[in-house]
Image (cartoon, helix red, strand yellow):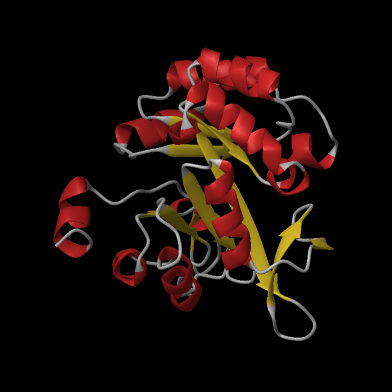
Amino acid sequence: MNAVRIFNEKEVDELAIIDIDASRNNAEPDYKKIEEIVSEAFMPVGYGGGISSAVQAKRILSIGVEKVILNRSAFRNPALISEIAGQFGSQSVVVSIDYKKNLFGKQSVYLENGRTNTGVNPVDFAIQMEKAGAGEILLNSIERDGTFSGYDLETIHKLAGRINIPTVAVGGASSLSDFKMAVAAGASAVCAGSMFVFQRPHHAVLISYPSQKELEAQVYA
């Protein structure tokens, strides 16, 4: 909650909350905590973790969440994307795609926090999710996540050129120049975690966020 308050002050555009434990433990979303976060946040909130039915999605959206984010459920049950989009609109459904290279050097979608290789190419999967009704793709490079090595521009470019819904890039951001390059590669928006929380070289925790003036000068220009 303290982090949310700080991000409020920093005028963050959007907040994506992913409950990793809920997905890992096949648990219900923590509706009480989600409601607390939404009540405190001044910006739109997207939530993912433990969502496996349209009933759960409805409850989360009714709390005030703008978008539900699906990962494993989207892969296991693509019809769920269509069901949620049909009830609440495609703009309410985000599919998060975690990907990395397999043992043979080919990119593949992974589930269970990067432990399960589906063997499906992330671009092909994004196309399938758009057809199912997803309104946005959250493209997360597992290999770059937390590395501060920059976004996977090649994959962003490939995917953005094949779908007609927004691609949001995740994984590897270290500076505003990375934001600009990702947008130039085709991303509709960028998302970051470690860059806003862990300050190098010792990874001290210090929440930060660029000012609107900095973003306008270095990213949107």
Q: Residue 73 sits in which quadrant?
A: top right
Left or right for 187, reference 129 = left
The one of 7 and 130 positioned closer to us in this rendering: 130
**Outermost residue, right side:** 25
Which residue is at 42% across, 24% downward? Answer: 41
Image position of 5 (left or right of 202): left
What percent of the width, then of the height, locates residue 221?
Answer: 14, 62
Picture coordinates of residue 32, whole percent (x, y): 65, 14
Q: Is residue 5 visible to the viewer in this orientation of the structure?
A: yes
Compared with 182, 33 (above or below) is above
Q: Nearer the viewer, residue 17 or 210?
A: 17
Residue 28 position (above or below residue 205): above
In this view, the residue in front, 95 or 198, is: 95
On screen, residue 30 versus residue 185, left or right, reads right
Asked whether the viewer can see residue 48, the reply is: no
The residue that appears at 35% across and 24% down in the rendered structure is 42
Instruction: Pinpoint residue 172: horizontal percent, then vertical percent.
Output: 50, 67
Farthest-out residue, bottom: 104
Percent coordinates x, y for residue 108 in the rendering: 70, 70
Residue at coordinates 69% horizontally, 37% vertically from top-left?
A: 79
Measured along the vertical axis of the image, is residue 121 above or below residue 136? below
Relative to 203, is 33 above or below?
above
Closest to the observer: 51 or 13?
51
